[in-house]
């Protein structure tokens, strides 16, 4: 965010911090020094060209100069708090019908704020990956309506969400589809969920890959008894976003096994998958399943999402159950024509991971990941593992450029 601010013409210094209001709610506040006055709307417009909505700060304060500590660093404690009531973001628009009123009540509970207007953007007022999961759970529980995380990205205000719910009449169907979690990038990367069945696992990763690639994620498609039909549905969704190859697929744990199967289906349909990036994925069969039952259980929990309550919801349970049923009957066999990149950590299946070399006519490359199998995208390890992903993406882009030349 600070880099994006510094990319704006005439901005000389910038820092972004999370400030906490009296009620404990946090919001991002940007402080900047510029050679001319900037209106907040102008600043937000400039940032929207570089950042997704959920990364744009809620408050902007222009300073004549940054306060400094005696050793010359920015004195964060001396930065002024936003003037006026901390929770005030824009002109308040009250709920106008019962659905908007109920949603406002739920949003206030989830975000921990005293008041939410129907035009406030979820990501501008403290929404993040954990809050998304809690919002979905509360709507499911309190309104008896099943929604998925894609709904929140497509309808990030109460006004839009209420309209979506009313049009669903009376329940939203689970229309799983790929959705971009960031905004800017030279290439598309299509991500398949781990055995939780939930694509939201990639929320923080996508933010860290802004400008590197556009991260498209999906939940596990669970409404096909025929798995070949399911795989073809994934392919159809991918080609709706990117009409021609080469394609890049991504998967964490069992998501890598699923990505491999999708790559085979794309090959059968005459499409080129150039690369599959995996996060600690082992070629799957009955034998491996027995050996790796502990790993599979860890990957299905992914405790860093802090989602124990969320995973108890019918939506999440169904995704997980159907994904695990799929894995029980899965054998990764056959051959793809894609480079396979596997970010691996030591586990009971360490040696078996190398068998991916027998499944591709191209290269199989291993990289040493940081953390344990279920910790690869945890807050304490995600930065280092995303750096490895960036290195892989740079190799892919460099190779594609050479082939074009």
Image: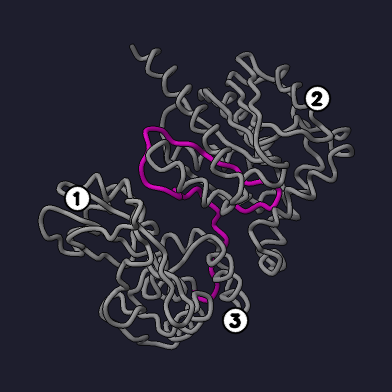
Q: How is the image coloured?
A: one colour
Name the side, left or right, on which 333 lies relative to 5: right
Which residue has dot 3 on it?
A: 142
Q: Earlier in the sequence, mark 1 or mark 3?
A: 1
- Residue drawn 60% across and 29% down? 263
| 90 magenta-colored | no
Q: Which of 31 and 179 is in front in this view?
A: 31
Q: In this view, does 370 lie above or below 169?
A: above
For marks 2 and 3, give the CA distance.
Answer: 48 Å
Q: Which mark is residue 11?
A: 1
Q: Mark 2 falls on what kind of element?
A: helix
- Residue drawn 67% across and 61% down? 316
- Residue drawn 72% across and 68% down? 312
Q: Is the magenta stretch mostly helix, strand or loop?
A: loop
Q: Is residue 273 above or below residue 256?
A: above
Q: Which of 294 and 369 is in front in this view?
A: 369
């Amino acid at each position: 965010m600070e880099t994006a601010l510094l990319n704006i013409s005439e901005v000389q210094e910038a820092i972004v911090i999370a400030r906490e209001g009296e009620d404990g709610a946090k919001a991002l506040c940007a402080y900047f020094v510029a050679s001319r006055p900037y209106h907040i709307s102008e600043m937000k417009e400039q940032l929207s060209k570089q950042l997704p909505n959920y990364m744009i700060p809620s408050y902007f304060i222009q300073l004549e100069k940054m306060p400094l500590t005696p050793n010359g660093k920015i004195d964060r404690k001396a930065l002024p708090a936003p003037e006026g009531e901390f929770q005030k973001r824009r002109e308040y628009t009250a709920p106008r019908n019962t659905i908007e009123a109920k949603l406002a009540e739920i949003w206030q509970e989830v975000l921990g704020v005293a008041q939410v207007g129907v035009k406030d953007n979820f990501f501008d007022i403290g929404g993040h990956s954990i809050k998304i999961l809690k919002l979905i759970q509360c709507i499911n529980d309190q309104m008896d309506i099943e929604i998925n995380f894609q709904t929140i990205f497509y309808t990030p205000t109460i006004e839009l969400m209420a309209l979506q719910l009313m049009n669903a009449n009376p329940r939203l169907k689970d229309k799983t589809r790929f959705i971009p979690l960031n905004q800017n990038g030279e290439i598309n990367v299509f991500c398949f969920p781990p055995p939780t069945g939930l694509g939201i696992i990639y929320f923080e990763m996508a933010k860290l890959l802004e400008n590197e690639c556009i991260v498209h994620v999906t939940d596990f498609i669970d409404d096909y008894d025929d798995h070949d039909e399911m795989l073809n549905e994934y392919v159809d969704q991918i080609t709706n976003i990117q009409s021609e190859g080469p394609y890049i697929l991504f998967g964490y744990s069992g998501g890598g096994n699923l990505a491999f199967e999708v790559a085979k289906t794309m090959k059968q349909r005459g499409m080129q998958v150039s690369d599959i990036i995996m996060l600690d994925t082992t070629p799957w069969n009955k034998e491996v399943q027995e050996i790796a039952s502990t790993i599979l259980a860890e990957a299905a929990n992914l405790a860093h999402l802090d989602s124990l309550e969320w995973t108890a919801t019918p939506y999440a349970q169904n995704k997980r159950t159907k994904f695990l049923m799929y894995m029980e009957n899965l054998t990764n066999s056959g051959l793809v024509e894609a480079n396979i990149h596997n970010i691996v950590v030591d586990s009971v299946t360490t040696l078996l991971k190398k068998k991916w070399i027998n499944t591709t006519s191209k290269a199989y490359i291993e990289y040493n990941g940081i953390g344990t199998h279920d910790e690869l995208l945890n807050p304490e390890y995600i930065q280092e593992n995303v750096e490895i992903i960036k290195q892989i993406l740079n190799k892919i882009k460099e190779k594609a450029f050479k082939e074009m030349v």
